[in-house]
Image: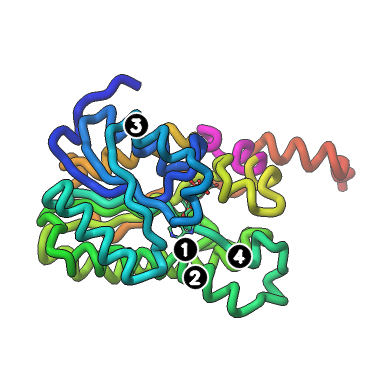
Amino acid sequence: MPAQGLLEGKKGIIFGALNEESLAWKIAEAAHDHGASFVLSNAPVARRLGALDGLAEKTDSPIIWADATDDEDLAKLFEEAGEHLGEVDFIVHGIGMGVNVRKNVPYEELNYDWYKKSLDISAISLHRVVHHALESGYMADGGSIVALSYIGAQRVFSKYSEMGDAKALLESIVRSWGYRLGKRGIRINAISQSPTRTTAGKGITGFDAMFEFGEKLSPLGNASAESCADYTVTLLSDMTRMVTMQTLYHDGGFSSMGISDELVFDLVEAYGEEEDQ
Ligand SMILES: NC(=O)c1ccc[n+]([C@@H]2O[C@H](COP(=O)([O-])OP(=O)(O)OC[C@H]3O[C@@H](n4cnc5c(N)ncnc54)[C@H](O)[C@@H]3O)[C@@H](O)[C@H]2O)c1
């Protein structure tokens, strides 16, 4: 898709680019193409993978390492980012991890320390990020904040387990901050994205089945990471300045479907047609 300069002159911080598959990686590339300048951030443990250096070079962005569950790290990050960028017009929160999910612990048997860690990383970190953005004094009036969510916040996808709770909390934090940020014209939204083949996505047991189900149910098919990046750019731009506190479905229509002919066909194939009464 040709770049249109929707973010010309805008400055931001993008959290969560781990490798080329990451949603935040694609968002950084698209934001760069649209004229934004930004700081990249990820957890210090991601540093040893070394992949982020390539994106930093390509988009001419500094990397500031910060654990998004650590207040000291975040305070330091906003201080350094502010010194580098000046006022920050946008923030992208592309952070998530389900510890029990990763370790294959079922919902009925959750390890509560890991559960708390999952909520802290995947949801409460958004609260912290916004808090430190405001506290630093570098968040610009009229700015835009975007977090990435999944429809597991509203509906049960059995293998998504604790992450459904984390996304429900994340979307609630979006609304709660949205009210408070509105006084300064700052908006905050969650994009509810289709299953996407990323490190976090593929870490979920049954991901391939969820992906296939999404592909067959959604009239437009699953939304790709690239299309998610394009959509995110619109939300970071002034074109959407009156949109806030929303969970916006970027899912090819999945969220409005019940069943599709394709899935009916698959079920008939698997279980056979019912005999006429
Ligand atoms: N992939 C999907 O199917 C899908 C669908 C909907 C929503 N999402 C959401 O999109 C967001 C980005 O995930 P992704 O799919 O691009 O996968 P990803 O694995 O590429 O990104 C997740 C990122 O979170 C970072 N992270 C983990 N713990 C952190 C911490 N303590 N501090 C800072 N960063 C930390 C990781 O290093 C990684 O960069 C997540 O919120 C995810 O839940 C993903």
At 52% from the left and 71% from the top, the residue drawn is 117
Find out whether the residues at labels 1 and 2 contact each other: C-beta distance under 8 Å: yes
Q: Amino acid at mark 2?
A: Leu
Q: CA distance from mark 3 to mark 4?
A: 31 Å
Find out whether the residues at labels 1 and 4 contact each other: C-beta distance under 8 Å: no
Report the coloring of the rendering. rainbow
Q: Is mark 2 within 8 Å of ligand 1?
A: no
Residue under label 1, please give it.
122
> In which quadrant of the rendered view does residue 11 lie?
top left
Q: CA distance from mark 3 to mark 1?
A: 27 Å
Q: Position of residue 97 (x, y in %)?
A: 54, 59
Residue under label 4, please give it.
99
At 48% from the left and 44% from the top, the residue drawn is 18
Mark toward the start of the polypeptide (2 vs 3): 3
Q: Is mark 1 within 8 Å of ligand 1?
A: yes
Q: CA distance from mark 2 to mark 3?
A: 32 Å
Closest to the observer, 126 or 175: 126
Q: Amino acid at mark 4?
A: Val
Mark toward the start of the polypeptide (3 vs 4): 3
Q: Position of residue 246 (x, y in %)?
A: 32, 57
Q: Quadrant of the N terminus?
A: top left
Q: CA distance from mark 1 to mark 4?
A: 10 Å
Residue under label 2, please give it.
119
The relative height of residue 247 versus residue 7 in the rendered view (above or below) is below
Q: Residue furthest bottom?
A: 112
Secondary structure category for the residue under label 3? helix
Q: Which residues are magenta?
A: 212-223
Q: CA distance from mark 4 to mark 2?
A: 9 Å
Closest to the observer, 137 or 148: 137
